[in-house]
Image (cartoon, rainbow, N blue to C red):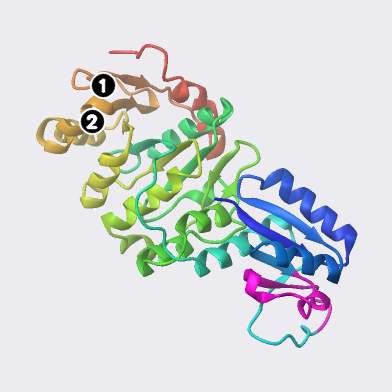
Amino acid sequence: MKIQLLIATDDCDYAEHLSNILAGEHADAIEVSVCSCHENLHEHLDSREFDVALLEASMIESADMQSIHLPLLLWPEDGNAPNIPGEIKKIRKYQRISSMVSSMLELYAREQAAESGSCLKRALITAVWSPVGGAGKTTVALAHSAGKASGGKQVMYLNLEPFSSVSAYFSEAGKSVSAVFEMLEAGKGNIKMLIRGIRLQDNASEITYFCRPDNFDDMNILTAENIAALIGACSEVTDELVIDMSSACDERTRKVFELADRILLVTDTTQTAQIKYSQFASQHNIFQRIKNKAALVANKGAMVNGSLVDEVICLPLVQSPDAVAVYKTLSAIVANQCHPSVRH
C-alpha cells in the first residue's frame, strides 16, 4: 500500500525539489500530488482523498480536512508557529528529506488501525544463532546481509540481541527500534508503515537496519507473538530478512526458528563453543526440527564435525580491529550459498 501524499504550498521551488526526491527515492511507499494555489487545492480535495497532506499555513484555510486523513503543517521554524485552528500536527519544512519522511510515516502509522490477518510473506528469512556468545554471530549475519545486498537484493538486518551491537557497524542517526516495540505491545497502529518510516540504509553496504532499542527492557519484554508480528511486518517490505538472534534457546528463539527459511548455526575455535553446539545438536529436540534448513558456520578457522547437518560453511579468521572490515571481508564467502559446502 502506498501513502497518497498531497504537498500544498505556493513555494514552487520547494515543492518541486521535495516531490522529485520523494518520487525518486521513496516511490515504493509514497505517491505524490502537488498543488500551488488555493483553486488547485480545492480541485484536488474535491476529486479524491489523501492519506497525508503537507500544508503551508496559507493553504490550511482553503483545505477541506474531511478529505485528508492526516494533515500536517509545514512549519519553517523561523519564528513562532502560526495560529492554526484545531490540533493539526506540525512538521519542519527545512530538514533532511529522509528525516521528514521518517517522521511523516511514523505519525501516519500511529494514526492507522492495526492490520488484521496475515499477509503473504515476501522476504526470504535467514536466522543466525549460536548457543554461545562471542562466536561471531553478528559478523556472520552482517556478512550474509552484505553479500546478498551486493547481489542486488534489498536486505534488512534485524538485531534481536538484548544488548545490541548495531552502533559498532552502522550510524544511528535515526529513530530507535523501540518505537516499533511500543506499537507491538499496544497492539494498534500500522507496524509495516512504521518500519518503512524508521528503517535506515547503510550507504556503503546498502543494508537496511534499525537503530538499537532505547533500553534493555524494550527488547526483553517482547513476547514470542510480538517477535512473530515484527518478523512478519519486516518480511513484507524487503527481499531478504536476516535476523541476528540472542544466544538464548527460549520460546522466542523457537518462534524465529519456526518462521525462518534458513538457519545459520555459528560456532568457532573455542572449546566452549564446540561443546555447546555439540550438546545442542545431540540433546535438544529443537535441532531435529530445524536441521533440514540449518547450515553450520565454522567461524574463525574452526575445525568442526559436520556430520549432523547437510551443509558446513567454513570461514577464515580475519584479524582486524575494524568490525566493519571483518564482515565485509567475509561477505562474499558467506553469501555464496550456491557453491558446494566445504566439509571437514
Return the x and y of residue 27 as percentages of the image width and height: 66, 45
Return the x and y of residue 90 as percentages of the image width and height: 69, 75
C-alpha distance separating marks 2 and 1: 8 Å
State whether residue 322 appears in this view.
no
Task: Based on the picture, tell me whether residue 64 belongs to the magenta stretch.
Answer: yes
The amino acid type found where label 2 is placed reads Gln
Q: Residue at x 64, y 64 (%)?
A: 49
Element class at badge 1? loop
Dot 2 crowding, Cα within 10 Å, few <14, some 14–19, many 20+: many
Frontmost residue, 276 versus 265:
265
Q: Which residue is mark 1?
A: 304
**Disc marking residue 274:** 2
Q: Residue at x 35, y 38 (%)?
A: 127
State whether residue 254 appears in this view.
yes
- Residues rendered magenta in the picture: 55-79
Q: Residue at x 63, y 63 (%)?
A: 104
